[in-house]
Amino acid sequence: MIVVRKGGGRNIDNDRYLHINVDDNPQPVAELRRLLDMNLGLLYQEKAGKLMTEGKPREAREAAALAARYTLQLDPQIRRRFDANAAAPNGRLRAILQDKEFLKELFPEN
């Protein structure tokens, strides 16, 4: 699967927003879904960080919610990793820890 968007590439020399290859997997459709979710989670996580840096907390919250949606099901340890990242001295997610309503939506089991 390849998705191209003008200026969408992570590198400055291409427009590849997404490029996933699963043709050697015994369950290619399931693997494609897993890899797509992983990639989208990373893209939205990056976007959330940029939006926080730009002073746009509402938009960052929306991007963080999408990142969580795509990554929560992939990593059962995501809450532990999230808390560690948020609590780090330079953790840009620290402000999110104060949004109890958002955290309840993000991690409903806690």
Image (spheres, rainbow, N blue to C red):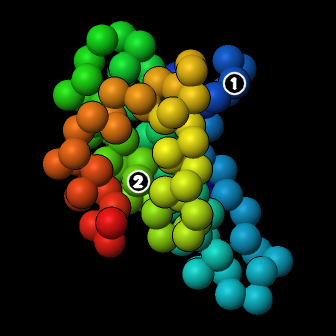
* Residue 72 in sight: yes
Q: Which residue is mark 1?
A: 11
Q: Amino acid at mark 2?
A: Ala
- The quadrant holding residue 38 is bottom right
Q: Nearer the viewer, residue 55 or 26?
A: 55
The tally of labels here is 2
Residue 91 vertical position relative to residue 33 in the rendered view, above or below? above
Relative to 66, is 34 on the left or the right? right
Relative to 91, is 12 on the left or the right? right
Relative to 81, is 6 on the left or the right? left
Task: Point out residue 78 in the picture as x, y percentages from the top left corner.
Answer: 53, 58
Q: Amino acid at mark 1?
A: Asn
Q: Residue at x 41, y 29 (%)?
A: 94
C-beta proximity under 8 Å, tags 1 and 2: no
Task: Point out residue 64 in the picture as x, y percentages from the top left corner.
Answer: 36, 41
As measured in the structure, the alpha-carbon distance from the residue carrying label 1 to the one carrying label 2 is 24 Å
Q: Could you say whether the residue bearing mark 1 is in a helix, strand or loop?
A: loop
Q: Residue at x 51, y 47 (%)?
A: 82
- Most extreme residue toward the bottom is 26
> Closer to us: mark 1 or mark 2?
2
Task: Point out residue 101 in the picture as x, y percentages from the top left corner.
Answer: 17, 48
Crowding around mark 2 (Cα neighbors within 10 Å: few <14, some 14 to 19, many 20+) is: many
Q: Residue at x 58, y 63 (%)?
A: 77
Q: Residue at x 67, y 58 (%)?
A: 20
Q: Which residue is mark 2?
A: 68
